[in-house]
Image (spheres, rainbow, N blue to C red):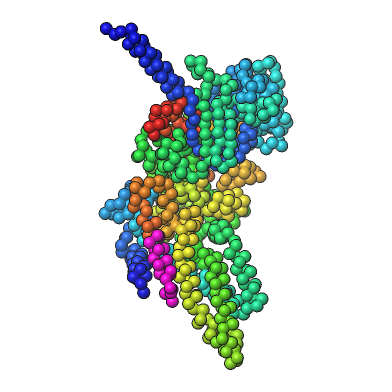
Amino acid sequence: MIGRRSFLLLLRCFTLLCVALTALAALAQNGGELRFCLRSEPKTFDPLLVDDDSSLSIRYLTGGVLVRVNRHTQELEPGLAESWKVSNDGTVITFKLRRGISFSDGSPFSPEDVAFTMHRLMDPALHSSTGDAFRSGSGALTTKITAPDQISIIFPAPIAGMERLFDQVAIMSAHSPKKEAAVLGPFMVAEYKAGSSVLLRRNPNYWKKDSQGRRLPYLDSIRLDIQSNRDVEMLRFKRGELDLINVIDSDYFDRLAAGSPGLAHDAGPSLDSDFMWFNEVTNAPIPEYKRAWFRSTNFRRAISQAINRDDLSRVVFGGHAQPAVGPVSAANKFWFNSQLKAEPYRPDAAMQRLKADGFHLQSGALFDKGGNPVEFSIVTNAGSKPRERMAVMIQEDLGKLGIKVNVVTLDFPSLIERISQNFNYEAAVLGFRNDDLDPNGQMNIWLSSAENHAWNPLQKSPETAWEAEIDRLMRMQASAADLKKRKESFDRVQEIVAEQAPFIYLVNPNALSAVSKSVEGADPGILSPQTFWNAERLTLNPTTRASR
Amino acid sequence: MTFARKLACIIVLAVCATSLAANWLAPAGYAKQFREAPSAPPSRQHLLGTDEIGRDRFARVLYGTRISLLLAPAAALVSTALAAVVGGLAGYLGGIWLRMARGFTDLFLSLPWLFLLITVRALMPLNVAPVVSVLITFFILGLLGWAASARVLSTSADALRNSDFVLQARASGLHGARLFVVHVLPNLKPVLYAQFWISIPVFILSEANLGILGLGVAEPLPSWGSLLRELEGLISFREEPWRLAPLVLLIVVMTSFQMLLSNEEVPA
């Protein structure tokens, strides 16, 4: 028999144990500081002026948006707006806002804040790149508050897929004296040490709650150390000083996966692509016979067929990349034209195409019909190992056709000057980092008049029939309100690009990241920010963390 | 000659001889891509394994050593010759010439040479064969690396100009170029040799610096600089120690050069 005193002692111990376990569980569920690195100094804390990766990360963590693209499903979800409706003509969007929400400083959220944010965003004097996406035609944007919780935003011309653009617009307070420091997102900037770190603390007024009614976010704070050296970042992650690395290269990924399997995450092909193109600019300082090669569809397609993309994916990226099909990665579930396939490696077919254009082999070297040896240079940016390696592998692949390729690595400013100012180059290998699922984000590439129409930019009128057709289709999809029609137009654009190969798409690298075992709830995806897109629901396990 | 210097001499000669025998020792060549075996560990076929795109690392180290060790002396020759002309003549002529040369040299020394190299490299024509790019890279290094040597040579020539034997030669009626060639230049030889030998490791390291930035010798040619880039991302030395081979070789050769040069005399 247990005596009364013993029983009471046992009861006390049991109660204490329960309290301790509950506290531990609460600790695991709430609190703690998540730590990871920004690769550069944030250029701004103003959410409307963001255009660098570090500022984007901070905006994502601190900014409250009307609608949010779910990084996992790629679908739109309600944010500060409970619901929204786009008018049939695509010029007006009406949001029904949540009520009872406050900014981090306690000032109430109202439709006036949305109106203030949109007017400020579209102010030409602000030069906001986020605002540029909303510029649809001449005339000013207007807003109309139709109810205490409802606002209509009226654009001068239709904007296709406009609701998705609001994922990038962090709402600012119209009245708070703290200006951009008053936020509606899960965290707020608490401390900034230039060159060292940014500390974000949880926003006590954040509106979102979990399914059990607990207020999000779970974390107390997030410390973002500014660290540009990736070796140091990886070393600190391995030591347990960091909890995640948002994007890692395939080299680091394989080493991490070999040493600590389970920490490295491969989310599959990303939206990014690496590609090659030839200089087709009319007045570029290159020999006329080379310009004629570069402007020949047969020549470009032959080069495309002579490149072994499977080898590029396997060797350069250690298998963490997929052969690219075209302007849209297969990861973009809706907009990818699934009828298209990556150009297979067919050197024989490539030679046939070249012969059709009058090229011929002589003592192992390829000559054009004018007797000129086929030789050109490929420029790429120094410091990007994957691109340098791809260029060297392309050099060997094309060497098998008798084409002599010189690989030149240039520092980035010199490279940009050559490809966009003086056009003194022949071919280039570069990449396109894409965070936008909608094809409207690629208007500045595909329109022949655009600055980023890399192979022949700023054309006064389209120089080829297929470029004119792409112009027409891109404009059509940009102004159509019907999603199906937009998809049809953009599918055709992808087909033309595959037929004409103005860009020779090489690979879509996979989205690789590293997440510590102490972080619970992480679900790395392909859309930016890959690892902390659900930061409000991330928790830290103190036991796992201590063991690291 | 001390034991240390003898040893250093043997090491440098052995490394030079091995690199010159690269064609026989590494018949696979430096450019052949064994795509089925990227980043492979050492094996009988690949003594130092393969690099990230499957090229034989042993072959690349040998050919890279050949390029760095043969062309660095060539660049040193260019820079020493320029230094002799600018510094030697300025020191010999003295007066305003000496002051102008020193001012110009100081100005040149104050330039951020790495940025200067990057700028000059970026202005070069794109369509050049890798071998030509190597020559261009080292020629640029030679053209830009004369200033420090010129400063030393101008001081030595200035001292010689006022020496007794030069005064006596002048008194005997010897002037101008003949006096410079017969009396001044032979006495500058030890300094010239010293500058030449000192410049070699400097140019090897300069090329390595450019290579690390990806701006050195064009692919697929290897150099020590481009080989050292492989060490980027190597977090633990224990993971793949064979990748350290180019670094070890660079350290050994540089140390040997220092041992050759650091004693009381240079190999003049």
Residue shown at the point (40%, 31%) measured from the top left: A546
Considering only vertical position in the picture, is A195 above or below B110? above
Q: Is residue B253 magenta?
A: yes
Q: Which of A505 and B146 is in front in this view?
A: B146
Q: Does residue B47 lie above or below A60 as drawn? A: below
Please state the horizontal and vertical placement of residue A269, each as a whole percent of the image: 44, 35
Is residue A9 shown to the viewer in this render? yes
Residue in view at x 61 percent, y 29 percent = A169
Q: How many marks?
A: 0
Q: Is residue B133 left or right of residue A194?
A: left
Is A421 situated above or below A152? below
Q: Quadrant of residue B152?
A: bottom right
Residue A179: percent from the left, percent from the top? 67, 29
Measuring 56% from the left and 60% from the top, which residue is drawn there?
B113
View extreme (right): residue: A139
Q: Is the magenta stretch mostly helix, strand or loop?
A: helix
Where's residue A154, x and y in %? 69, 24
**Front residue (pair A263, A4):** A4
Quadrant including the N terminus of chain A: top left
**Which residue: 62% across, 21% down?**
A102
Q: Tell me if I can see residue B221 in this picture.
A: no
Residue A427 drawn in magenta: no
**Image coordinates for residue B31, horizontal then vertical, percent:** 38, 56
Q: Give the range drawn in magenta.
A: B250-268
Q: In the image, is residue B56 above or below residue A489? A: below
Q: Quadrant of the C terminus of chain A?
A: top left
Towards the viewer: B255 or B137? B255
Name the foreground residue: B101 vs A291: B101
